[in-house]
Amino acid sequence: MNKIFGNDVEKLKNEGGYITSSEIYNQPSVWEDTLKIIDSKKDELKDFLDTILIKKNLRIIFTGAGTSGFIGDTVVPSIKKKLDVDVESIHTTDIVAEPETYLKKSVPTLLISFARSGNSPESVATIELARNLVDELYQVVITCNKDGKLAQNINPEMDKSIILPEESNDKGFAMTSSYTSMVLSSLMIFDLDNIENIKKDINKLFSIGEYLLNNTDLIETISNAKFKKIIYLGAGSFYGLARESSLKLLELTQGEIVTKYDTPLGFRHGPKSIMDDETLIVMFLSRDEYTLKYEMDLLKELYNPDSKYKVLAISETKETEIEELSNYHIALTHSKLNLDKAYLSIDYVIIPQIISVLKSINIGINPDNPSPDGSVNRVVKGVTIYPYNK
């Protein structure tokens, strides 16, 4: 391959950007390996979860920091609908700051921790706090690093670990394949009874991702436009995706491109004030007919063919009305997949990932190391964890 996303490979290797670009590009093959891992552990995970999910008053907490926290934000709306238990996404950064606000002593709790490195101070501290404060604690650790502290600190009788493919442990600064692989694996472990029925469509999802990654002309055009602000909007699972997309752009451009996230309905309540002529609004559209009514109303309100700001609509299927109400439209496929909409996140996010890396390169930043002064690190530093003695 001579080019990735329109950039010369040798130039990227010499000037920076090759690691992040290639990690984004190689995601479908990492997903295939992730599927194999979950498939191989299917019976073990099902036996483990079946004994826990029948617990009275069970609570499930998905947790992580930064992008790892946004994984929970992405998958929880989907999993909430499947399970008749309390399911929440609570970031480790919230739990560590106020443990007794979020951890309940007498409530049986399944803690599902996400981590790329498994070494973030808050991730390690959250597990220790949960062990000390919750009487009946079970854990699933989903991580990309078999040697990380989270993977190494497992109680085999009460916990399970899922070690994702080595390639998912991104070497670049930003979490890309780690995010999508952990989203995919967490959705699948709560779809184990149905996994054989949806495997065909999961593989279609991988093929769609591969197509997107090899047909990036429109994404390159959008990235080369002189937008100084990019706003990501999504509802439900796509709100978590909007948060992740915004963080990716913020990280890779060192904040030089202003970025915000919100829900389509929430955007009108003040955040819309950020819009000007140099703004791109990206909407992750739902397949749910009821939710889509509200999203289409906002598209109608925002779209103006004569305006200098632009709207990019991303949807599962190609729809004439969406095309007519947006400056740019990217659709994944011609017919709906037999999958919960949260699965679509792994393909949807490819688009903001590419925009982020190209914007970074275009403004002269090395996306592989966008913070060379060390003010922001691949694995967070400078956090002191204090003893909790209450």
Image (cartoon, rainbow, N blue to C red):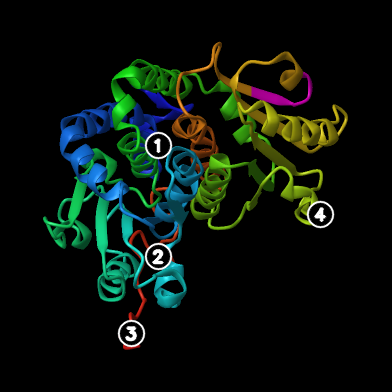
Q: Which residues are magenta?
A: 324-329
- The quarter of the picture where residue 17 lies is top left
Circle 1 is placed at which residue position? 21
Which circle's residue, 3 or 2, is located before the other in the chain? 2
Residue at which label 3 appears: 388
Q: In the rendered structure, which amino acid carries the disc numbered 1?
A: Ser
Q: Secondary structure at mark 3?
A: loop
Q: Is residue 288 left or right of residue 309?
A: left
What is the C-alpha distance between the residues marked 2 and 1? 28 Å
Q: In x, y percent, where is residue 137?
A: 26, 63
Picture layout, residue 228 above or below residue 335: below
Residue for badge 2: 92
Q: Residue 52 magenta-drawn?
A: no
Query: SS of the residue at dot 1?
Result: helix
Residue 292 in view of the camera: yes
Q: CA distance from mark 3 to mark 2?
A: 15 Å
Q: Are marks 2 and 4 in contact (CB under 8 Å)?
A: no
Which of label 4 and label 1 is nearer to you? 4
At a point 39% along the width and 44% down the height, the residue shown is 179
Mark with earlier residue (2, 4): 2
Q: Is residue 254 left or right of residue 122?
A: right
Q: Secondary structure at mark 2?
A: helix
Residue at x 17%, y 57% (from the top left corner): 158
Callout 4: 10 Å neighbours few (<14), some, many (20+)?
Answer: few
Tell me the number on the disc at residue 273: 4
Q: Earlier in the sequence, mark 4 or mark 1?
A: 1
Q: Secondary structure at mark 4?
A: helix
Q: Is residue 156 left or right of residue 260?
A: left
